[in-house]
Image (cartoon, grey):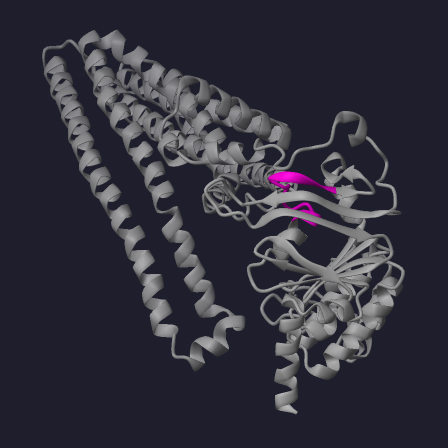
Amino acid sequence: MSGVSEAQDRLTAGVVADTARSTAVLAWRAAPWNLVALAALTTGLAAVPVVTAWLTRLVLDRLTGVEGAELFALAAGLAATGLVAAVLPLLRQFLGARFDRAVSLRAVDRLYSAVNSFHGLARFENPVFQDRLRMARGAAGQSVGRLVDGGLRVAGGALTAVGFLTALYAMDATMTLLVTASAVPALVAELKLSRRRAHTEWRVSAAQRREFFYQMLLSSLDAAKEIRLFGASGFLKERMLGERRIVDAETHRTDRREFLTQSLLALISAFVAGTGLVWAALAARRGQLTVGEVSMFVAAVGGVQSALSGVIRSLADGHQHMLMMGHYLAVVRAGPDLEGPPQPLRTRAHLPALRKGVEFRDVWFRYAEDHPWILRGVNLFLPYGEAVALVGQNGAGKSTLVKLLCRFYDPTRGAVLWDGVDIRQVPVPQLRRRLGAVFQDYVPYDLTAAENIAIGDVETLTAPDRIREAARRAGVHDMLSRLPRGYDTMLSRTYARQAQHDDETGTTLSGGQWQRLALARAFVRDEPDLLVLDEPSSGLDAEAEHDVHLRLRHHRAHRTSLLISHRLGAVRDADRIVVLADGRIAEEGTHDALLLAGGTYAKLFTLQASGYQEEA
């Protein structure tokens, strides 16, 4: 997505048409009758000031010399118009707020449907995409509704302006041209300002994201202990304020230009209105205009300027929201991030169960063309029903290999095969239904205990027995049962759902308890063909680690599994141990065979064992 920022402040006619069409379709599908009602109200509001000005002129010109009944009818019409003018804006505001909610809901739904369709991690690890996604969230919440509302206001303002210009032209063509011409520089200036505002928002998005990061750190429970113990709060606060100053400085430059430009436009508008007023007064003195016509002229000049000013503001605001919608449409139209299978395979009901094994065939991988290779020609076979352990130093490529196995990325070269079938030929959801996993960087969700486990298979939300069985197998059932609300206890004190007359604020778990909960999350999935265990016992004490590995050994019996661990004592009972070094397979074999070989594994194991012996 390089070059995005340069393209965000330019709108071609084709882009405008496409964005307007997409926004209109989205709005119509979200609330069609509400949109029709808003259009009708906008038309009525556009006619009210013109009708009021005409009736006022007629009343003033007929104060003498007409029957009382006719004057009463005109006055009653004027009063009714005033009543309509008072009620319609309130009704439009009510329907507009309802419309905004409906459109925003549909836009957010469409946005996150698109985000959920991204099966890989590359876009989420791209800071440019994160900035664009943040802008798209803002557009979904505001820009869609404002674009439609702005379009209606432009149409209404144009109708009002045409009505007043017609009346003005009937009195003096020169003044009509002068008032119209004065709107041209305002239109050009406002469009330039809106472009600058949108460009400023894009430029400061990275600083705003960093500011939000520092705010989260300063208010996060997870970071509170370290920050306070190490006295780092002042440092982080200054970092946060530094990012805020960057944003404020850029915004101030835009605000200053906007103030100077709009002040100049206001002077031009005041000059035109003053000139018109002087002309009308002189014309009335010469007998060229009646009192009613003078009032009509004054109302027409003010009405045209007000209507055109509203149109210009709506166009400028719409221009800015169109730029924002560009980010929204870019996300929802981004398309798949991973190569999909051919059409015949795409419609298969399910991926056949694993019967032979998973093979990495000459796999090379790097995260970008200018990045170093992480994996270099890896050839690895995970036989069906066997436990394979993967060990190696930090940066050897172990986690990357897991990402490829789960198809968060595709190999740069080579292939990952499932019973001889390239997993790129298989729908991603079908592949992942066959996998169970415990990740080192598991997520402690701010949900109930039951929901935290059911995240591993959301269908089990309606099967509490499966949730409890998974917890028992992970050794966490007794602890969860003792919580204030058992499995329905919120495991958070930040987002606890507080019912009426309920002061429960949720509870928190220790690191080891969360580790077992993450294990239950993997166990809740029915019979996975392949179990991926990435440092499943990190952070546990020796007794808990031993217990967890006994449970894992029982769970993975007769299953294909890949175990990654820095603690070599935890992998010694694997059927085969593979040593990864510098992106290549350095050694593989059983624990005893690798010790006899005296290679990298033997050195690492001896080093770790000597550390335990010294402690003993």
The answer to whether residue 90 is above or below residue 302 is below
Q: Please name the residue shown 20% across and 9% down the image.
A: 172
Q: Please name the residue shown 38% across and 41% down the image.
A: 202
Can you give x and y, in whole percent of width and height, for residue 258 in the image? 24, 38
**In front of the other: 171 or 273:** 273
Can you give x and y, in whole percent of width and height, for residue 559 in the image? 86, 58
**In front of the other: 356 or 339:** 356
The answer to whether residue 449 is above or below residue 15 is below
Q: Please name the residue shown 47% across and 22% down the image.
A: 43
Q: Is residue 413 magenta?
A: yes
The answer to whether residue 50 is above or below residue 350 is above
Residue 491 in sight:
yes
Asked if residue 531 lies left or right of residue 140, the reply is right
Q: Is residue 311 magenta?
A: no
Asked if residue 390 lies left or right of residue 285, the reply is right
Can you give x and y, in whole percent of width and height, for residue 610 in the image? 63, 83
Asked if residue 145 lies left or right of residue 175, the reply is right
In the image as oriented, which residue stretches furthest toward the bottom?
616
**In front of the other: 451 or 124:** 124
Q: What are the residue bounds of the magenta stretch?
A: 404-416
Residue 471 in sight:
no
Can you give x and y, in whole percent of width and height, for residue 272 in the image? 16, 23
Question: Quadrant of residue 188 in the image?
Answer: top left
